[in-house]
Image (cartoon, grey):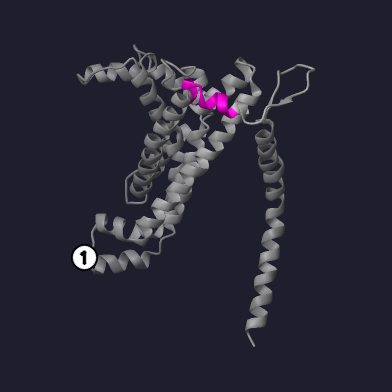
Amino acid sequence: MTRRPATRAARHEARTALLMLTPALVLLLVLRIIPAGIAIGESFYTSVPGSVIPPKFVGWDNYLDLFADPSFWESVQRTLLFALLVNPLTMLVALFLAWLLTRNVALTGLWRTLAFLPTALPLMGTTVVFGVLMRPEGVINSLLTLMRLPTSGWFTEADGALSAMIILSTWTAVGYWMIFLIAAIRDVPRDYYEAAMLDGAGEVRQFFHVTLPLIQRQLLFVLTASTVWNFILYAPVSALTKGGPEGSTNFLMYDIITRYYTLSSPGSALAEMTILFLLMGLTVWLQFRMLGRLRSV
């Protein structure tokens, strides 16, 4: 007798949720899905921006030209290497800060504000400040000299520029993901920690056996969103390195913008954008698979 009212309540709740989500879904369709579909379709055409000559259908030629271009494969390698390094680093630092700031640490509010500050500032503003700090004669190299550690040319050296981009991306994103993970950790019921303490578990065992298993969904969200963000990183590269030196920071997103606007090759740029979408999807799928296997262990 109680199933029918429960079913009605569930249906009413589902309809209400769909109604509330409709504006967001419409915006997602209009601003994301439809433009992406148009971009994929136009990747099979060639055209000249601003020309009255209509686009010409060339089939797979744009993709074949990309595959024959060594600079494209260098961009793919650099982008994958960057994502492979920066995504785990960002998640680990955000997770550590979230765990630390949910402990009984003095001045927790102050440390949380300082960690979130780079995220709250405009990205270009943070990028400019970071570029000044990492000049050859800047503050970072001065501190390294005081500590008798080797300095770096940072944005004037290939390896230094890639390392600087990894640090900058982590610095600007870690505070944002930290807030998500703080909320996730605070949502873990205290009963689990009390039961673990009765079993003699210390802070470290509680973290690995209680906290981590219960925030896996939030960790997966952070990892996925961070992956997408880092695949489309453009502004810091444009402001600080222009893809150099020696192509060390010529990531796919920067290469796409360069092909479209500088080289006036929209068809090639949109083909590269389509490949970037596929790489993002494949990377996210692999992350889901890996975390799924870890969850089942």
Is 159 in front, or is 269?
Answer: 269
Q: Quadrant of the N terminus?
A: bottom right
Is residue 122 or residue 231 the one in the foreground?
231
Judge whether 211 appears above or below 242 on screen. Answer: below
Residue 276 in the image: above or below residue 71: below
Q: Residue furthest left?
A: 148
Magenta highlight range: 63-72
Q: Is residue 212 left or right of residue 254?
A: left
Q: Quadrant of the C terminus?
A: bottom left
Q: Is residue 234 in view from this perspective?
A: no
Q: Is disc 1 placed on a helix, strand or loop?
A: loop
Q: State the residue at coordinates (35%, 56%).
A: 294
Residue pushed farthest bottom?
A: 1
Q: Which residue is mark 1?
A: 200
Q: Main secondary structure of the magenta part?
A: helix
Q: Where residue 174 sits: x, y (%)?
A: 42, 38
User: Whole-percent x and y of residue 14?
Assistant: 66, 65
The question of residue 71 being in magenta is answered with yes
What's the residue at 34%, 45% (across, down)?
Answer: 96
Report the label total: 1
Q: Give the residue at x 37% y 51%.
A: 102
Which of 38 and 217 lies nearest the eye of the viewer? 38
Dot 1 alpha-carbon crowd within 10 angstroms: few under 14, some 14 to 19, many 20 or more: few
Residue 158's quadrant in the figure? top left
- Counting from the top left corner in percent of width and height, residue 42 is at 69, 31
Q: Position of residue 268 (x, y in %)?
A: 61, 25
Queried whether the magenta region covers residue 33, the answer comes back as no
> Farthest right residue?
52
Q: Amino acid at mark 1?
A: Gly
Residue 47 visible within the image:
yes
